[in-house]
Amino acid sequence: MAVAILAGVTWFPGLRRARAVRHLPVTGDVQQVMERLTDSYRGERAWLRRAGQREGIRELRVDRLPDGRLRRSYELAQGRRVWRVTTEDVAITETTIEVVHRGELAGPRLIALRWVITERVSAERAEHGTDITVLALGQLAGPIRVLHLLGYGDTITAGRLVDLSRRHAEGTTAAIAALFAAPPGPAAGADRAG
């Protein structure tokens, strides 16, 4: 009886990862789709445009890594608290793009809160084009993760991390949908790409 009760208990709740999955069908074959998604110049322009529209954003920075990948970073001020966010393309293959988002909340009288969201965009051939799947996996990082592993603030923290992962997946899916709603070409990429 006691073993059955313990079997249903999450021993270390912090080991769970927040997970969000979104699917999107688009027109075009996998190669064409991946070429548009991995265009680093389009991605840089779109990111700078989106980030520049948010209030409180400062220190926008885009670094081109030697192999063509991008690293984007910014700070978001919310009163006396500051979010430092870095997004880096870590792997690009013929059918997948893997991006890591790292964030840290710093401020007076706060335990530094750090999170990592690994986002994977994959493209698969479909009957009428390409199916895109966006998977976002989030988890806490740094000293706060130890407290989270032990269950400290588990419900609130886990809920917010799930929400953040969901928003990343939905934002990426919306940006891809906007990109493929516009006709391919430099003018469309500059004006409507996400």
Image (cartoon, grey):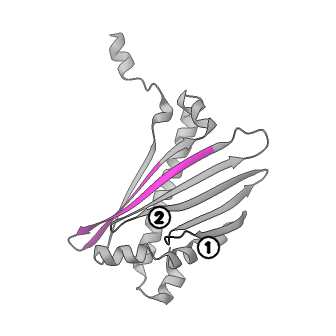
Measuring from the top left, give residue 77's x and y in whole percent.
Answer: 74, 57
| Amino acid type at mark 2 | Thr
| Amino acid type at mark 1 | Leu
Range shown magenta: 114-137
Q: Which residue is drawn at 52% across and 79% down?
A: 41
| Quadrant position of the N terminus in the picture | top left
For numbered disc 1, what is the local secondary structure? helix
Pair 2/1: label in front: 1
The residue where tag 1 is placed is 48
- Please, is residue 184 above or below residue 166 in the view? below
Measuring from the top left, give residue 121's x and y in whole percent.
Answer: 39, 62
The residue where tag 2 is placed is 172
Residue 153 seen: no
> Which quadrant holds residue 113?
top right
Q: Residue at x 79, y 50 (%)?
A: 80
- Please, is residue 10 above or below residue 117 in the view? above
Image position of 68 (left or right of 36): right
